[in-house]
Amino acid sequence: MSLIRPDERTPDRAADGRPVPGVPALELSGATLAYGSRVLWSDLDLTISAGQLVAVLGPNGSGKTSLMRVLLGLQPLTAGSAKIGGAPVRRGSTRVGYIPQKVSVESTTMVRARDVVRMGIDGHRWGLPLSFGPRWRRQRDRIDELLGAVGADAFADAPVSMLSGGELQRVRIAGALASDPALLLCDEPLAALDLRHQQEVAALIDERRQLSGTAVLFVTHDVNPVLEYVDQVLYLAGGRFRLGPPDEVLTSEVLTDLYGVPVEVLRAKGRVIVVSSSDLNASGHHHHEPNQHPPGRSS
Ligand SMILES: Nc1ncnc2c1ncn2[C@@H]1O[C@H](COP(=O)(O)OP(=O)(O)OP(=O)(O)O)[C@@H](O)[C@H]1O
Ligand SMILES: [Mg+2]
């Protein structure tokens, strides 16, 4: 059990690092975000307990990434409050792991896979890496352990610019988990991955929340790869939202109301497909919307 830095003490953990039961990993109350007069979502109450996974769905521009930025302490709420582990959100907290939507500088430079993980351990503080001594050895072992856990041992020393999309995503997950966060924010981590890697990455994140109780907020355009793991769906659209278990939110009635246009939710072989009803009528066959958003309202 690691001792906790004084500035990282939160009510969900005792001073020796043991979890304090009953404190949610994430708690949004009356949370509202507006840019000027444009309201993205308002009066959002969302509690995520340890080990829970909440999928965030919604069309382009509905405020999914903005929600993550709020939880990273990069964007203040217009109203309401956001707490992580019982403490107000704070920029640079190692209690939050983050897999950003856009791949940053790492893919274009000669940074190695293990450097990405080390930056995660350091809480993204750039600085002189340790290069010898017992602390270096401990850190090196921890990096190897993290890379091993995501099946990335084989390319630990490869420059990230050489990795495939799926390999890079594994390394980024290891980096996001390096500080043993209470809350893992994943912003479309499956985009650009093939089906097999989508399933692998989803299973990896699921395994993590089961083993370590990490709470997960998972932004995705396709809910299917994570559907079996989802505890709640937060669906954002048109300045409003719906929150609840997948079976309650992913229905024709709820999404038609949310979008304000007829939407049909089809279920086939355990998969959810969201289409606009006009599509079905016009074309006479099922028009599969890969991003799950009815045309006309997206982007
Ligand atoms: N700092 C900002 N100031 C003003 N408007 C912003 C700011 N950041 C984002 N926006 C706008 O707010 C809206 C929501 O952006 P956001 O990135 O949260 O959407 P998103 O749901 O993640 O979309 P996508 O699916 O395309 O990633 C967009 O229209 C965006 O242009
Ligand atoms: Mg986004």
Image (cartoon, grey):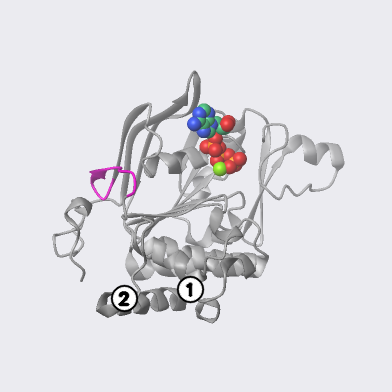
Q: Give whichever of 266, 235 is nearer the camera.
A: 235
- What is the crowding at mark 2: few (fewer than 14 residues within 10 Å), some, or many (at least 20)? few
Q: Is residue 207 above or below residue 231?
A: below
Q: In which quadrant of the rendered image does the C terminus lie?
A: top right
The residue drawn where x is 79% and y is 38% is 279
Residue lying at 77% horizontally and 34% vertically, measured from the top left: 278
Q: Disc 1 vs disc 2: Cβ atoms closer than 8 Å?
A: no
Q: Please check the rendered image and state whether residue 90 is part of the magenta-colored stretch, yes or no.
A: yes
First-in-chain label (1 vs 2): 2
Instruction: Measure the alpha-carbon separation of dots 1 and 2.
Output: 21 Å
Question: Residue drawn at (13%, 60%), measured in percent from left and top?
Answer: 15
Q: Is residue 268 above or below residue 56?
A: below
Direction from residue 74 to residue 172 in the image, left or right:
right
Q: Which mark is residue 150?
A: 1
Q: Is residue 33 left or right of residue 93?
A: right
Relative image position of residue 159 (x, y in whole percent): 57, 70
Q: Is residue 172 above or below residue 114?
A: above
Residue 256, label in figure: none
Tell me, yes or no, if residue 155 can be seen here.
Answer: yes
Q: Is residue 10 magenta?
A: no
Q: Which residues are magenta?
A: 84-92
- Residue extending farthest to the top is 37
Q: Is residue 187 left or right of residue 222?
A: left
Residue 10 shows in this picture: no
